[in-house]
Image (spheres, grey):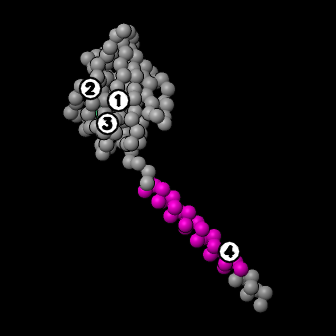
Amino acid sequence: MTTQIFFFITLLVLTTFFTTTLASHDHDHDQDHHNPPLATVHITNILPQKNNPMKIRCNSNKKYFGYKTLACGEDYKWIAEERDLYFCEALWGRFMASWHAFQPKRDIGQQSVFWLVKQNGFFLSWDNSTWVKKSIWETE
Ligand SMILES: *[C@@H]1O[C@H](CO)[C@@H](O)[C@H](O)[C@H]1NC(C)=O
């Protein structure tokens, strides 16, 4: 009799445990479903080899990445939340530039957003092969 009660209680505890675990798992799954889609932003420095490295700083209203130094040929990437705007500033010798590296209105639905940084400006591509100039270097 005692054994039966013990068994019953154990069963009850286990059932409660599994139900709770499954319920919280479902909850997580639901959360995932509501997370915004993500896009990868790539920024590649292809400035001439002989020049200074460039410094770059990007942020959204939620994320601040800090300054990074990008040597010639080097690239920098991060995962963007598609509903956030990501703004970047770059410094290169006496030049500076600022542009929207990820702009929801322009880039939503794209898996990747590629940028090439050249002497004559900043070029955007969604497929890493067709490029459109979007911004230029400026001096004070
Ligand atoms: C983009 O294209 C360049 C040149 O073909 C290649 O080296 C690079 O790996 C590509 N980047 C990605 C993320 O596919």
Mark found first going from the N terminus, 3 or 4 = 4
- The quadrant in which the C terminus is found is top left
Q: Are marks 2 and 1 in contact (CB under 8 Å)?
A: no
Callout 4: few (<14), some (14-19), or many (20+) C-alpha neighbours within 10 Å?
Answer: few
Helix, strand or loop at mark 3: strand
Q: Residue under circle 2? A: 134
- The quadrant in which the N terminus is found is bottom right
Q: Are marks 2 and 4 in contact (CB under 8 Å)?
A: no
Q: Nearer the viewer, residue 34 or 43?
A: 34
At label 4, the amino acid type is: Val
At label 2, the amino acid type is: Lys
Instruction: Inspect this view and state whether residue 64 appears.
Output: yes
Q: Are marks 1 and 3 in contact (CB under 8 Å)?
A: no
Instruction: Inspect this view and state whether residue 112 appears.
Output: no
- CA gap, disc 2 and disc 3: 13 Å
Rendered location of residue 8, percent (x, y): 70, 83
Compared to residue 32, the image places residue 97 above or below, namely above
Helix, strand or loop at mark 4: helix
Mark found first going from the N terminus, 1 or 4 = 4
| Picture mark count | 4
Mark found first going from the N terminus, 2 or 4 = 4
Tell me, for residue 13, which label it has, or none.
Answer: 4
Q: Nearer the viewer, residue 52 or 98?
A: 98
Q: Residue furthest right?
A: 2
Compared across the picture, whether 128 is left or right of 4 comes to: left
Residues drawn in magenta: 9-33
Q: Residue under circle 1? A: 100
Tell me, for residue 113, which label it has, or none.
Answer: 3
Mark found first going from the N terminus, 2 or 3 = 3
